[in-house]
Amino acid sequence: MNDSLLQRVTLDLNICHGKPCIRGLRYPVEFILELLSSGMSIEEILADYEDLERDDILAALLFATRLTQVKSIYNIAR
């Protein structure tokens, strides 16, 4: 299931300057995350953006989760 969700996140230099986007659409993953962090529910996002699907939102969350799975974070701003 996770692999099929991650396949919804695409990278194309010609779309949104190569940022990770949902299914080649002009919805960067960061935009989906911003909507969620602003308090919008998945249902509200889907109502406002009819070309998005529930699995697109889940894919954005999974993609962000994978990006944060690091062994350690160093404070480089000293």
Image (cartoon, rainbow, N blue to C red):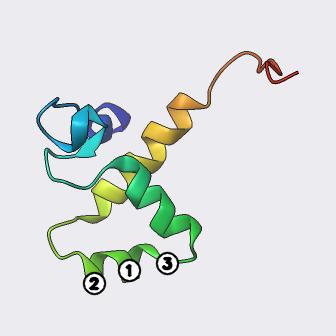
Q: Secondary structure at mark 1?
A: helix
- Residue 30: x and y in percent read 43, 50
Q: How far apart are labels 3 and 2 at the CA level? A: 11 Å
Can you see residue 7? no
Q: Residue at left 29%, top 55%?
A: 56
Mark 1, residue position: 43
* CB-based contact (under 8 Å), mark 3 and mark 2: no
Q: Amino acid at mark 2?
A: Ala
Residue 40 shows which numbered tag?
A: 3
Q: Residue at left 51%, top 67%?
A: 36
* CB-based contact (under 8 Å), mark 2 and mark 1: yes
Crowd class of label 3 (few under 14; some 14 to 19; many from 20; radius 10 Å): some
Can you see residue 28? yes
- Residue 68: x and y in percent read 61, 31
- Going from N to C along the chain, the mark reached first, 3 or 2, is 3
Q: Is residue 44 above or below residue 33?
A: below
Q: Residue furthest front?
A: 78
Q: Residue at left 57%, top 76%?
A: 39
Q: Secondary structure at mark 2?
A: helix
Mark 2, residue position: 47
Q: Amino acid at mark 3?
A: Met
Horizontal side, residue 67 vs residue 15: left or right: right
Quadrant of the snapshot with the C terminus: top right
Q: Residue at left 53%, top 30%?
A: 67
- Residue 6: x and y in percent read 31, 36
- Marks 1, 3: nearer the viewer: 3
Q: Secondary structure at mark 3?
A: loop
Q: Pick whichever, 32 or 71, lies toward us.
A: 32
